[in-house]
Image (tube, grey):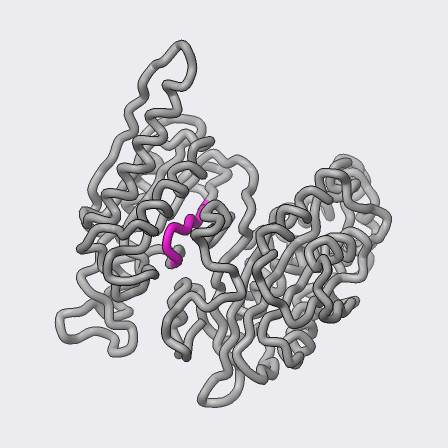
Amino acid sequence: MLAVASTPFSGGFGPVGHAAACRGRARVVLVRHGQSTWNEEGRIQGSSDHSVLTPKGESQAETSRQMLLSDAFDVCFTSPLARSKRTAEIIWGSRGAEMIPDSDLREIDLYSFQGLLKHEGKAKFGDAYRQWQLDAPNFIIDGHYPVRELWARARSCWDRILAHNGKSVLVVAHNAVNQALVATALGLNTRYFRFLLQSNCGVSVLDFTPNPRGGSPLICLNRLNQLGGRKAAGRIFLVCYGTTQSGSEVTFASFGYESMNMLGVIQSQKTAEVLLDVKVNSIVCSPRIASVDTATAIAEVQEAADCLGADCVPRYVEMKNMLELEVEGFLPASGGGGGGVGVRELWDQSGRAWELVLKELAAESEPERNVVAVGHPALHVALIGGSISVIDFPDGPRGRGVVRCVNYTAHLGRWSIPVTRPTATNDEEF
């Protein structure tokens, strides 16, 4: 199976997925609509079409338009609901290519829940509302299983999206349906509902490659939910160091033995700046030069931030070396040999590294603790130079983790690669 260099979240349509036709390599960019009037009011929207974008929602859509301005799309599929359709119009701008409304891209059907304020839903439906919150895959209302129906619709959407001739496709829809699109592409069942959240105007990217053996295409989740999220009791930031002297991109073959080039230095500084509003408690990093330099840049910006006011109280950000965040060579195709680390060994090492990072998150009793981990890209979900991935722990480090964002690069501005551009030098990969 092809290992696309952008992130290890790759595979084919699994047992709950669908062997959709894939005419050629394609990149699909998913965007959720901007804030709507019912988002603002806290109403349950579902597939109702009574809310529109707020001024904030229009501004969020404009931000996404600017982020995607340099990207060339062949076609745009959009939900027919007003809040998504308007978001798509703003992002699409003056592009002359067609926009295709698809009713299966509407938000999840929530039947009698739709239009209710959340406290009204809880008061009126009681046990059903609790099931919606705690066991959504088995949630039933008005004789329907909304999440199961949504997964079926998502698989149907992929048939039409991948059958289109476009190699670069924009899809503008909603939180739940975009989650379902990502999940069904990766072969994840309904249990993963709410694990792959989409913020208002958050951008996610999937790459599709025809399988040389036939059947289902090969899929890679390139980026997830670029644009932020809510606070959590604990948060881990996985940071990829900037590009190094040997090349313009961070790849599996780049082991961080050398220092970063000028682009990498800029990327690490931009990464430090985007974390400025986060109170980082601890930074763990590989002992290699590129990782240490990136970690040092983050620490220096954090410490300087506390001295901007008149009452300057310097804060020390603890930095620790963690050997488990480094890989002594990685040979994905051969599975090891020749002194390199194979996929199985890499997987085991990733597990050990993750346990150590979780221990670091739980090291103190602070109500909101943030840990930054900088290491070899093969051990991270972030594999694009200067990118950031975020895992939230709403109930603390011993609770369930939620993937908030993968491969966030918007902070890099002109020093990032547009999402429709290839991120690997090999012509056979994206």
The residue positioned 74% from the left and 70% from the top of the image is 98
Height in image: 284 above or below 252? above
Identify the residue at the far right of this view.
Answer: 50
Task: Locate residue 364: give its quadrant.
Answer: top left
Height in image: 417 above or below 120? below
Residue 426 left/right relative to 109 = left
Task: Locate residue 78: give its quadrant.
Answer: bottom right
Identify the residue at the far bottom of this view.
Answer: 213
Residue 243 left/right relative to 308 = left
Identify the residue at the far left of this view.
Answer: 339
Identify the residue at the far top of this view.
Answer: 311
State the quadrant of the N terminus: bottom left
Q: Is residue 403 visible?
A: no
The residue positioned 21% from the left and 51% from the top of the image is 259
Q: Which residue is nearer to you in this view: 371 or 190?
A: 371
The residue positioned 51% from the left and 70% from the top of the image is 207
Counting the numbered discs, the total is 0
Q: Which residue is nearer to you in this view: 315 or 357?
A: 315
- Whether 388 is among the magenta residues is yes
Q: Is residue 232 visible?
A: yes
- Whether 120 is among the magenta residues is no
Measuring from the top left, give residue 427's x and y in whole percent.
Answer: 41, 78
Per the rendered image, the range of residues in magenta is 384-391
Measuring from the top left, give residue 277's x and y in whole percent.
Answer: 46, 31
Measuring from the top left, give residue 392's x and y in whole percent.
Answer: 47, 43
Measuring from the top left, give residue 113's x and y in whole percent.
Answer: 80, 48
Residue 379 left/right relative to 278 = left
